[in-house]
Structure formats: C-alpha cells, structure tokens
Image: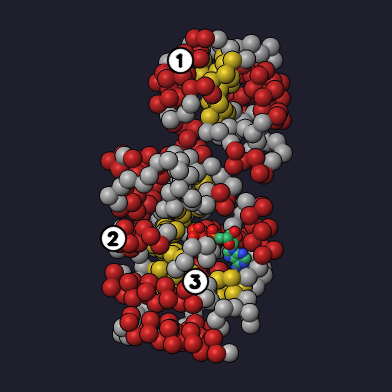
Amino acid sequence: MNAPFHPRTATLRDPFAAFVCDDQTADALRPVAIEMGWPPEKVHKGGLRNAVQTLAVSASPHILFVDMSESGDPLNDINALAEVCEPGTVVIAAGQVNDVRLYRDLVASGIQDYLLKPFSADQAREAFAHAQLTLSGPRTAEHVADRPHLMATVIGVRGGVGASTIASSLGWLLGENEGRSTALLDLDIHFGTGALSFDVEPGRGLTDAIENPSRIDGLFIERAMVKAAEKLSVLSAEAPLNQPLLTDGSAFYQLQEELKAAFESTVLDLPRHMLIQHPHLLHDTQSVVLVTELTLAAARDTIRMLSWLKANAPGAAVTVVANRVVSGAGEISRKEFEDSIERKVDLAIPYDAKMFAQAAKLGKPLAEVAKSSKTGAPLIELARGISRAAENGEGKTGGDGRSLMDKLGELKALLPKRKAK
Ligand SMILES: Nc1ncnc2c1ncn2[C@@H]1O[C@H](COP(=O)(O)OP(=O)(O)OP(=O)(O)O)[C@@H](O)[C@H]1O
Ligand SMILES: [Mg+2]
C-alpha cells in the first residue's frame, strides 16, 4: 500500500490484524490465526470502516485482513485504506460480491487476495501462507548454485564492542555491493539487534526453530526469514526474558544447513558465550571477523579467541577489526595492541558517535549511512575481502604457532609499563 512511511513505528508493527463484519467470519478466522501463531484478539469487528479508522492512528500490521461486506463503494474504500496503511503491508480482502472485474480492480489497487464469503479455513490458511511468502526473503530458486556459499561469523571479543553493528553492515554490503543473496542469522536470542537495526520485526521464526528443530526445512526458512533489504534477509529474535535458551544446538546446525541451501552468503552474529556452548557452530565458517577495541581486556580476549579459533576452526580466515578507535586517546595504542596479540589489526573503524546515532535513528545499517565516509570505508573493504576470498576458495589462519600463555604473559608485561608512564 502506498502511503507516507512513518519510520519509527515500523518496529511496533503487529504481524497480523483483521477487521471483519460478522461473527461467522470472525469464527472462521480465529483458529487459523492461532495456527499461524497470531493472537486471536487481533480479529476485530467493524470491517473496512474500522480498519481505516484504526490504522489512521496506529501502526499497520504486516498482514491485514479486511472484510468489505458492508462497503458501498469497495474501490473507493480500499483507496481510503491505502491512505492510512504503511508500505509493505500485505492486504487480504473478503466480501460477498462474486465479480471478476471487482477482483481485478482490487488487485490493481494493491490488494493481494480476495476471498469470497463464506470461505473455508483452508482458503484463509492458503491466503495467509502466500502473504507470509511475500513478506519473507528470497526464494530458494533465486540461489545461484555455481557460486560457493560463503559463511562469515562475526564475534565480539568483549561485550558492546560493535560486533552486531558490523555483522549487519557486512550482511548488507554482501548483498548490496557484492551482489550475493545474504542471510543474517543473529544468535543473540534475547537481546539481538539484527532486526532492529533494519527497522523490521524479528517475527517468531528463530524462537520457533529453537523450540522445534525438526520443523526446519526450506519452506520454513522461506517463511521465517524477514526481508531487510533488496538482497538481505534476517533471522533474529527478541525472546522473552523469562524464557531461557534451552537447546542442544541442533536447531542452529539445521538452520545453517538450510541457509546454505537458500542463500549465497550467511553472516552469523555470534555472541561470544555461544562459542563456548556450541563450538560446532564454526565448523563451516570460512571467515571469522573478530571485533575488538583497543583496550587491555580486549587484547587479552583477542589472544584467547585467536588461540581458540586456531584449535577449533583451523581452516577459517580470521580478520581482526578494531572498532571505536580514537586515535591517540585509546587505553592502549594500536601498536601496543598489535604487539601483544602478535598479529596485525587488519582494519580499524573510528569512533564516530554521529554516524552511528544517525544509522540507529534511520533504522539503516551503518554501512549504508556511512558509505561515502571514512567510517564506512573499512566495512566496504571487509565485505570485498571476504567475498573475494570465498570466490577464490582462499583461507588463512589467525594462528602463528606461539602459545597462548606466552602471549598472555607478554600482555601482562604491558601493565607495569603503562603504570610507570
Ligand atoms: N565505531 C563506533 N563509534 C561509535 N559508536 C559505535 C561504534 N561502534 C559501535 N557503536 C555503538 O555501540 C553500541 C553497541 O554496538 P553493538 O550492539 O553492535 O555491539 P555488540 O558488540 O554487538 O554488543 P553486545 O555485546 O551487546 O552484543 C551501539 O549503540 C553502536 O551504535
Ligand atoms: Mg551484539
């Protein structure tokens, strides 16, 4: 539907709402809504008229069902609905008029489907499944089989270093600049920002997958993925805080397998504690992006993480990205950091409060907002490097044969030096 977009309300959008004219239609819809995982209370009375009034003052749902039985001038009323409905809403209409011309006109006005009343549960189910497919990401058929799949995993060595920001930007750039259909899998089940950073609803896909790993297949992926950009789909969750993450990890394995089949690249936003719990998550990763800050604690954890990766993901190419870099004012210098981890920092992203705030406000990835600035340049380089390496089947390991204890010992030696200054 074409109406002015209200950017920040999009995060509050319900997955579904219906406005019906009679009890019979409400009774037909409620069980189907429950099956789809939607609250049955979202089936309201009042038909199209109430839909227009309600949506004029609240966010549009992703899927909207409107009963037009009481509408004297269906086309005119549908246009009134278009005025208040946000873009991206999939509208399914129902009515009692069996006229192919009306059907065609409604479809031309942006309605996805028209159900003739009374309709069966199967008809409603089919219409909603189709609507979900429209909302979800790229179809399996779009996958270009001769391009090797690229799996990149982004891990923050400490909390809050900017790993998720970099993961969402990397996903966006692999789609936008490198032309790969890309999935962003955000495994921060409770606090993930994968969907939020693109101003889309996370949906229930990821929590459903964890609860029922046996349901994960190609069709499940098509329905669960939320389209965030032209070539990027997101699987993310905002699981309730009273719902602990109970999984043996099989759902994650299954998800990775299906994403490999459906997309050309997968970007995994992996909270560092998940790495300890589920080390197998890195088995198929060609590329690991370790995001760090230039601090002592981050240097310690970068050393430990590099050592872990050497043992657990020996074939993966590791890129160390220093983020939030303030030149000349960091806790330790880039040189001191590189000396202690005994490895170069591959890319440095400056601290740029303005650009990051702007990206958050616009609900756009940092890489898009900062694409022609020096903050965005290292991200473009990162995406290009990872994509090229995958195309050439390249890999390089982050290890260099030095023991973890040696490196930690040298890191500690830095401490008195700093205090003496
Ligand atoms: N270079 C930067 N300059 C300024 N702000 C930044 C920079 N990088 C990240 N931020 C901000 O820091 C915050 C944390 O970023 P983000 O959520 O990506 O970190 P994270 O490592 O994924 O955190 P968590 O440990 O919670 O998963 C965000 O508000 C982000 O906008
Ligand atoms: Mg994060």
Residue 28's disc number: 1
Q: CA distance from mark 3 to mark 1?
A: 54 Å
Callout in the foreground (3, 1): 3
Amino acid, disc 1: Ala
Q: Secondary structure under badge 2? A: helix
CB atoms of marks 3 and 2 within 8 Å: no
Q: Residue 272 appears at what percent x and percent y? A: 40, 62
Residue 395 in view here: no
Q: CA distance from mark 1 to mark 2?
A: 45 Å
**In the image: residue 203, left or right of residue 58:** left
**In the image: residue 287, left or right of residue 163:** left
Q: Quadrant of the C terminus?
A: bottom right
Amino acid, disc 3: Thr
Task: Name the residue located 66 percent from the left edge and 31 percent from the top edge.
Answer: 58
Q: Quadrant of the N terminus?
A: top right
Residue 300 in view here: yes
Residue 396 occupies quadrant: bottom left
Q: CA distance from mark 3 to mark 2?
A: 22 Å
Label 1 environment density (alpha carbons within 10 Å; few <14, some 14–19, many ≥20): some
Residue 280's disc number: 2
Q: Quadrant of ligand 1?
A: bottom right
Residue 303's disc number: none
Residue 292's disc number: 3
Amino acid, disc 2: His
Residue sitting nearer the eye, 153 or 103:
153
Q: Residue 41 appears at what percent x and percent y? A: 52, 22
